[in-house]
Amino acid sequence: MTPDSLKDYRDKRDFGITPEPAGRESVTSQEPIFVIQKHAARRLHYDFRLEVDGVLKSWAIPKGPSTDPQDKRLAVPTEDHPLAYAGFEGVIPAGEYGAGTVMVWDTGVFRNLTEKKGEAIPLGQAVAQGHLKVWLKGRKLKGGYALTRFKTGKDESWLLVKADDGEADPCRTPVADEPQSVLTGRTIEEIAGEEG
Ligand code: MN
């Protein structure tokens, strides 16, 4: 973990106002974790976060993840988040960065499957090189997913695609049909009503 990997995250937030974690404590887990947070900000999106080298590498996915290998979902990188963010559900007050309601849509652990010519590629290196493959063990999402960068620079963009494996299911539409939090069972509207 580079010392200032979370600087962007902290610079954008006033922890006296937002209920989000400052994430100064270090957290370690046996297996790396992932989380997908539904975020009703100015524009609704899903934040896909993977534990890499002590932080959560993050991408915002406007349409959310799919279980259909035919679907390519746009994923736009955002700043690294602290590991503690994986348990965050609540309301970011109006006027603050990312204002809106956050719900833990799915979470679990994962395995890094990234390889090149039969050799395993560490995840930090895979992110830097613009291609990674992981096996998710979530409550809603399972199996292989690939994230691939297709545009660099100011508008850096990636695609999230379900691998065509035994966990693929073109008939499922989890974003639409499974809208509740895996932590609390609440919908994003219920969280907004209770904590807003
Ligand atoms: Mn977000």
Image (cartoon, grey):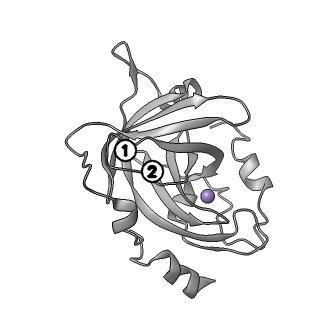
* Label 2–label 1 contact, CB within 8 A: yes
Ligand 1, by image quadrant, is bottom right
Query: What amino acid is labelled 2 in the image?
Result: Phe
Q: Secondary structure at mark 2?
A: strand
Q: x, y percentage for residue 98?
A: 69, 63
Tell me which label, 2 or 1, sits earlier in the chain. 2
Please give left or right for residue 159 compared with residue 81 in the image. left
The crowd level at tag 1 (other Cα within 10 Å; few <14, some 14-19, many 20+) is many
Q: Nearer the viewer, residue 9 or 158?
A: 158
> Is 135 rendered above or below residue 174?
above
Quick check: 57 left or right of 119?
right
130 sits to left or right of 164: right
The amino acid pointed to by label 1 is Phe
Q: Residue furthest top?
A: 117
Cβ of disc 1 within 8 Å of ligand 1?
Answer: no
Q: Secondary structure at mark 1?
A: strand
